[in-house]
Amino acid sequence: MKLPHRGYEFLCYGLPLLILKKDIIMKSFAVIVTILFSLFLVGCKETLYSGITEKDANEMLSALLRRGVVAEKVSEGKGLFHIAVEHEDMVRALDIIKENSLPRTPFKSLGTVFSGDSMISSQLEEQARFAYALSQELSDTFSKIDGVLDSRVHVTLVQHEQSSGITTPPSAAVFIRHTPNSPVVNMVGAIRETAAKAVPGLTRERVNVMLEDYREKILPPALKTVPWYLTNSALLSFGIIIGIIFSVLAVFGLRFKKLISLELNLPKKTESGAQPAVAPKTEKESRK
C-alpha cells in the first residue's frame, strides 16, 4: 500500500497519531475537554451570596429574575446554597437585594431567648430579655404579612421607679417597610390590637405604628449591544463544534493508529519495485 503525499499523511494520520500516542492521553482527553468546557460556561459568574438556606435563596433568586438579572442557585451541601450572577450584573444585583431587605433577618422566639440558661440573673436582666423576646416574636409575626419587606418592633415593659414611686406604663413602637400594593396599609388597627394583646398591660393607644412605602429605585437594565459571535448561544455553538472536531480526530486516530504503525514497519521498496540493495559483506564476514 502506497502512502499518500507527506503533507496529507501528516494531517490525516500523523496528527491524530501524535495526539493519541499514549493510552493515558486517550483516556483523559474526554475528561479534560468536559472540564474545560464546564469552566468556560460557569467561569464568568461570581458568587453574590453564600451560606444561605433554600428559602432565602429562592427569595433572592425570584427577586433577581423578576428584574432581569440572570442568576443561578447552586447547592453547597448540608442544606445551604449560594446565588451566582454574571460579573457585569453584580452591582445591580447587590442593589436589588439591599432594596428588598434580602436575605430576611432571622427572628428569635421566647423559647430560644430563654433556653439553656441556668445562671441566676437579676430582675432587670430578666425583664430586658423578656422585652427583647416579645419584640422578636412580634417582628416575626408582622413580617408574614403580604408585601412586608422588613419589620421591627420595640417593646418597653412597665417601669417602676422605687425612688420616686412613679410607674411608667408599657409601650411599643412598630416600624414596617412594605411594597405599594401591600394590604398592611389597611391593617394599622389590627397591628395595634395584636401588639397590645401580646405585651402585658399594653393598650392600643400606647402602640405607635410607622409605615414606609417602598418605591423601587433600581432602574431597568440598559439594552446591551453584543456582537452575535459573543452571545451565549454562539459561544455554546462554537464549543460544541470544537468538541465534535476533536472527537472526529480522536476517532480517526484510533482507527488508523494500527494501520500507520504497520505501514511504517513494512520494508520500503524502490520506485521500480525492486528489492532494496543489500550491502556487500565485509572481509571478516566472508571468512566466516
Image (cartoon, rainbow, N blue to C red):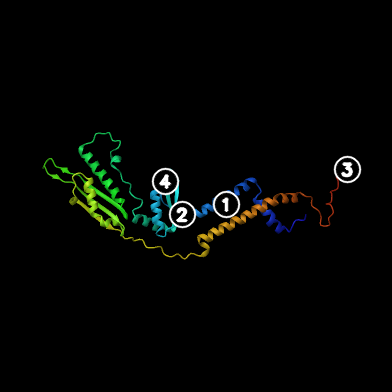
| Dot placed on the residue nearer the N-terminal end, 4 or 2 | 2
Give the quadrant of residue 137.
Answer: top left
Which sits in the foreground, 90 or 283? 90
| Residue 29 x/y as whole percent | 60, 49
> Marks 1 and 3, how far apart in space?
61 Å
The residues bearing labels 3 and 4 have C-alpha atoms spaced at a distance of 86 Å
Q: Which residue is drawn at 51% across and 52% down?
A: 39
- Disc 1 versus disc 2: distance between alpha carbons? 20 Å
Q: Which amino acid does label 2 sit on?
A: Lys
Q: Name the residue under label 1.
A: 33
Residue type at the position of mark 1: Val
What residue is pinned by disc 3? 286
Residue at image position (29%, 48%) is 141
Disc 2: which residue: 45
Dot 3 amino acid type: Ser
Mark 1 and mark 4: Cα distance apart in space: 30 Å
Q: Point out the tag, 1 or 4, that comes first from the N-terminus.
A: 1
Please rate how many residues cluster around mark 2, counting C-alpha atoms within 10 Å: few if below 14, some from 14 to 19, many from 20.
some
Which mark, by number, is residue 80?
Answer: 4
Q: Rounded to the nearest whole Å, what is the CA distance between mark 2 and mark 3?
A: 79 Å
Q: In which quarter of the image is the C terminus?
A: top right
Q: Which of 124 and 107 is in front in this view?
A: 107
Viewer can see residue 41: yes
